[in-house]
Amino acid sequence: MAEAALKLIMFDFDGTLVDSQHSIVAAMGAAFEGEGLAAPGHEKVRRVVGLNLESAIDALVPREARSAVDTLAARYRETFFKMRTAEDFHEPLFPGVHEILGALQQGESLLGIATGKNRRGLLASMERHGLAGYFTLLKTADDGPSKPHPEILRQAMAEIGVGPRDTMVVGDTTYDMIMARNAQAWALGVSWGYHPPEELTAAGAFNVLTSFDELHPALAVLEQAP
């Protein structure tokens, strides 16, 4: 199969596997309003999803309120925990996630997660969606600097013992693409997340999927690359 050419495929989480934008926007708004600040707009929040929480808030908060970043992050985590433990919490997978992960798992590539979420939040979401069994390793905000810094990707490659040209990042933001490029790995975008396809291409994606059905053809093209 085409994916055998790659030894490690690292997936982003929010915006790539899980449609979490509404809960993230709601939790961010509640955190800001709880500190007496205007809630950032939907589009502004979408632009920073993928960064670790403190970096995302720092990009959203007014300059005069920069000292409140840690407090806002704590409020966000408290709010999001309450949301995700509520009976009516809805954070669906994107179409085809189980199918594509199951198919990839039958090949020779190892699968991992590289996310700006902390480990606790990632594990909770993975358990909710039955995703834990697909992945060999998880790299989170607890493991290193925020994307697009390549440290967590380099850690993953070192732990598995693979090189950059045997590694691919699948993600929905320019942070994912630049992280991969900075580590000299392959970058593959998805069009259904937080940053538009043309930005993903400009940031280094060799292709941008419009559905997970296109992943295997994209890998077949990659296998022919020099």
Image (cartoon, helix red, strand yellow):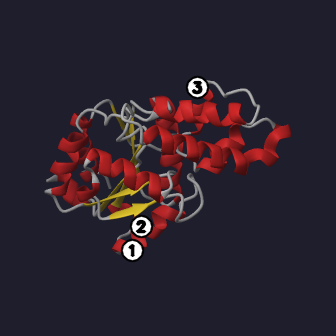
Q: Position of residue 175 (x, y in %)?
A: 54, 46
Q: Are marks 1 and 2 in contact (CB under 8 Å)?
A: yes
Mark 1 residue crowding within 10 angstroms, few (<14) / some (14–19) / many (20+): few
Mark 2 residue crowding within 10 angstroms, few (<14) / some (14–19) / many (20+): many
Question: On screen, 19 above or below 221?
Answer: above
Circle on res. 43 = 3
Identify residue for label 2.
156
Question: On screen, 23 above or below 142?
Answer: above
In terms of sequence position, does the residue under pointer 1 or pointer 3 come before the other? 3
Does residue 46 appear in the picture of this structure? no
Q: Which residue is drawn at 29% across and 64% down?
A: 136
The CA span between labels 1 and 3 is 36 Å
The CA span between labels 1 and 2 is 5 Å
Circle 3 sits in a helix, a strand or a loop, which is it?
helix
Q: Quadrant of residue 168?
A: bottom left
Circle 2 sits in a helix, a strand or a loop, which is it?
helix
Q: Which residue is drawn at 59% across and 32% down?
A: 45
In terms of sequence position, does the residue under pointer 3 or pointer 2 come before the other? 3
Q: Where is residue 59 in the image (x, y as percent from the top left)?
A: 70, 40
Would you say 203 lies left or right of 192 here?
right
